[in-house]
């Protein structure tokens, strides 16, 4: 089943970004997608919240880098003086409607891999639940944040928002510009005209671009750390495999190649939890995974595993805009409302 899913995802992705003509067969379904999008937008009247909500989302399917952006944004807003809280659907977890507070020790199978990674890296409270409004309400009651970041949720229209950030991949952008399933878009491209900011991974405009910074490699078993520079020399003569369940694994593989590593590439479907069986089939001396993969490796003690640690920085122009709009001096702790 997983093999067929992988093949379907790869086939669709190639078609979306290479302009495959056979996708016109899906045009009637894309018309239905457009009708549903418009219907949902006109029928929803979101309730209000006493705390500003910043949605960090996307209009394309697949990975664009929202998780590193959320972590960087949370850290930057904390420096500005805000008390940050984060909500997420908890995709891939079993929480359901929720809400559920994410602990650093929470199982990824329960809360989802991305919320768990965010909670561990950003060190701010995270609440998950399919109903984001309920998650935000629970977050406010439990932690009294002065600002809430929503992990995705651009299309979750029952969630009120004060600021919308769309994250795009600078190489893929909008693909063929068509709605699902004919193209990769969840909403029409014109939606970008109504958001407050567009961030572009590997973009060129300094006001909208962000780039990954390779911090190094952490050995999962011993916590030993290797610097990114020079790792090719450290692992010279060893068989190195890159294994991941990312929505866009090529970014991960390219990052390792840029360090001079020659790796065997193993891509599983997005949000796939690597198992001992998966790893046992890989003939390698070193297995490199992402942080998102690592949080799902509970109970696996394979000593070949190293974790690629990355970070990013959001543009200063965006931070200035957020600082102007949500001045901490004017923020009212929600516990007093």
Image (cartoon, helix red, strand yellow):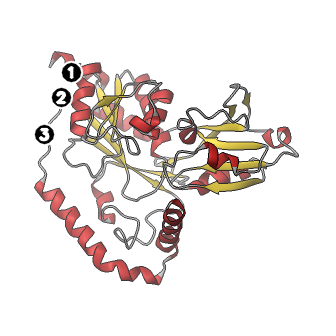
Picture quarter containing residue 312? top right
* Residue situated in front as seen by the camera: 205 or 18: 18
Q: Is residue 329 positioned above or below 236 on the image?
A: above
Mark earlier in primary sequence (3, 1): 3
Label for residue 256?
Answer: none
- Image coordinates of residue 314 in percent, x first then y, are 48, 39
Mark 2 nearby-residue class (10 Å; few <14, some 14–19, many ≥20): some
Which mark is in front, 3 or 2? 3
Mark 1 nearby-residue class (10 Å; few <14, some 14–19, many ≥20): some
The answer to whether the residues at label 2 and label 1 have Cβ atoms under 8 Å apart is yes
* Residue at image coords 65%, 37%: 307
**Element assignment for label 3:** loop
- Image coordinates of residue 101 in percent, x first then y, are 34, 27
Q: Residue furthest top?
A: 336
Q: Is residue 277 left or right of residue 154?
A: right
Mark 3 nearby-residue class (10 Å; few <14, some 14–19, many ≥20): few
* Residue at image coords 53%, 35%: 295
Q: Which residue is mark 3?
A: 47
Q: Which residue is mark 1?
A: 334
- Image coordinates of residue 89 in percent, x first then y, are 33, 42
Q: Which residue is mark 2?
A: 50
Does residue 258 appear in this view? no
**Element assignment for label 2:** loop
* Residue at image coords 17%, 15%: 336
Mark earlier in primary sequence (2, 1): 2
**Element assignment for label 1:** helix
């Amino acid at each position: 089943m997983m093999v067929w899913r992988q093949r379907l995802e790869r086939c669709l992705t190639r078609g979306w970004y290479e302009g495959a003509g056979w996708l016109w067969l899906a045009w009637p379904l894309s018309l239905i997608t457009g009708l549903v999008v418009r219907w949902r937008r006109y029928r929803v009247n979101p309730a209000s919240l006493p705390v500003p909500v910043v949605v960090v989302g996307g209009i394309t399917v697949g990975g664009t880098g929202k998780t590193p952006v959320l972590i960087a944004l949370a850290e930057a807003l904390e420096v500005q003086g805000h008390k940050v809280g984060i909500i997420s659907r908890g995709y891939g977890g079993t929480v359901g409607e929720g809400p559920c507070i994410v602990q650093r020790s929470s199982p990824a199978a329960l809360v989802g891999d991305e919320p768990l990674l965010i909670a561990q890296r950003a060190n701010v409270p995270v609440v998950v639940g399919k109903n984001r409004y309920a998650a935000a309400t629970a977050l406010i009651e439990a932690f009294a944040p002065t600002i809430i970041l929503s992990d995705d949720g651009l299309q979750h229209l029952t969630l009120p928002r004060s600021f919308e950030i769309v994250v795009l991949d600078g190489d893929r952008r909008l693909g063929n510009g068509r709605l699902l399933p004919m193209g990769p878009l969840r909403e029409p491209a014109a939606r970008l005209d109504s958001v407050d900011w567009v961030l572009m991974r590997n973009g060129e405009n300094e006001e909208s671009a962000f780039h990954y910074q390779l911090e190094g490699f952490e050995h999962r078993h011993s916590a030993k750390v290797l610097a990114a520079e020079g790792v090719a020399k450290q692992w010279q003569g060893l068989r190195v495999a890159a294994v991941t369940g990312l929505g866009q694994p090529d970014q991960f593989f390219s990052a390792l190649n840029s360090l001079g590593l020659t790796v065997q590439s193993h891509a599983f479907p997005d949000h796939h939890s690597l198992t001992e069986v998966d790893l046992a089939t890989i003939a390698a001396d070193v297995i490199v995974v992402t942080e998102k993969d690592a949080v799902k490796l509970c109970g696996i003690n394979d000593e070949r595993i190293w974790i690629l640690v990355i970070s990013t920085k959001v543009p200063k122009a965006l931070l200035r805009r957020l600082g102007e709009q949500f001045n901490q001096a004017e923020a009212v702790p929600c516990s007093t409302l």
